[in-house]
Image (cartoon, rainbow, N blue to C red):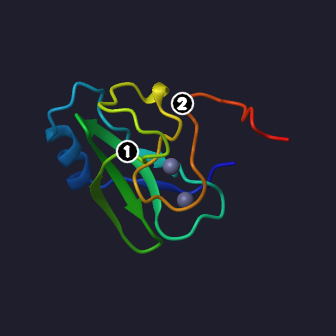
């Protein structure tokens, strides 16, 4: 279950992402929070990845900002080039549970 919050980037934020040397397509102007439902702290959506740096949009009801992060070490694989190879697709220090949106994966250790 993901947090349903959404954010609309302003012109300055879109210009910032357009200026990044990323081979990925342009960032969408509206993004959804990628954290778990009911998480603490700011909402967060991945905007763009440049090498080992991920630029996340983080927002609250009153403000939004773009911050650089590295991957969550939920699984250490470096250098990471493919999000699908990650167990957790969120940023380091993210609130809530680890995400595994890249690959739905059963925990074989359960019960
Ligand atoms: Zn959220
Ligand atoms: Zn994580």
Can you identify the residue that label 1 sits on?
71
Which residue is drawn at the image coordinates 63% and 49% (left, top)?
Answer: 2
How many C-alpha atoms fall within 10 Å of the one at disc 2: few (<14), some, or many (≥20)?
some
Which residue is drawn at the image coordinates 85% and 41% (left, top)?
Answer: 111
Front position in the image: 40 or 28: 40
Quadrant of the picture in which ligand 1 is shown: bottom right
Height in image: 77 above or below 58?
above
Q: Is residue 55 left or right of residue 12?
A: right
Can you identify the residue that label 2 sits on?
102
Height in image: 68 above or below 65?
above
Q: Quadrant of residue 39?
A: bottom right
Which residue is drawn at the image coordinates 41% and 38% (left, top)?
Answer: 76
Q: Quadrant of residue 99?
A: top right
Q: Is residue 95 left or right of residue 1?
A: left
Q: Is residue 51 left or right of residue 70?
A: left
Q: Is residue 64 left or right of residue 22?
A: right
Residue 75 x %, y %: 47, 39
Q: Earlier in the sequence, mark 1 or mark 2?
A: 1
Q: Is mark 2 within 8 Å of ligand 2?
A: no
Height in image: 82 above or below 3?
above
How many C-alpha atoms fall within 10 Å of the one at disc 1: few (<14), some, or many (≥20)?
many
Which residue is drawn at the image coordinates 28% and 27% (left, top)?
Answer: 24
Residue 101 x %, y %: 57, 35
């Amino acid at each position: 279950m993901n947090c349903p919050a959404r954010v609309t980037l302003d012109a300055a934020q879109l210009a910032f992402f357009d200026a990044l040397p990323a081979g990925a397509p342009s960032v969408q102007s509206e993004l959804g929070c990628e954290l778990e439902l009911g998480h603490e702290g700011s909402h967060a959506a991945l905007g763009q990845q440049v090498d080992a740096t991920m630029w996340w949009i983080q927002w609250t009801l009153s403000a939004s900002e773009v911050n650089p992060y590295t991957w969550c070490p939920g699984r250490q694989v470096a250098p990471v080039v493919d999000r699908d190879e990650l167990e957790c697709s969120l940023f380091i220090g993210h609130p809530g549970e680890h995400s595994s949106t890249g690959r739905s994966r059963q925990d074989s250790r359960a019960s």
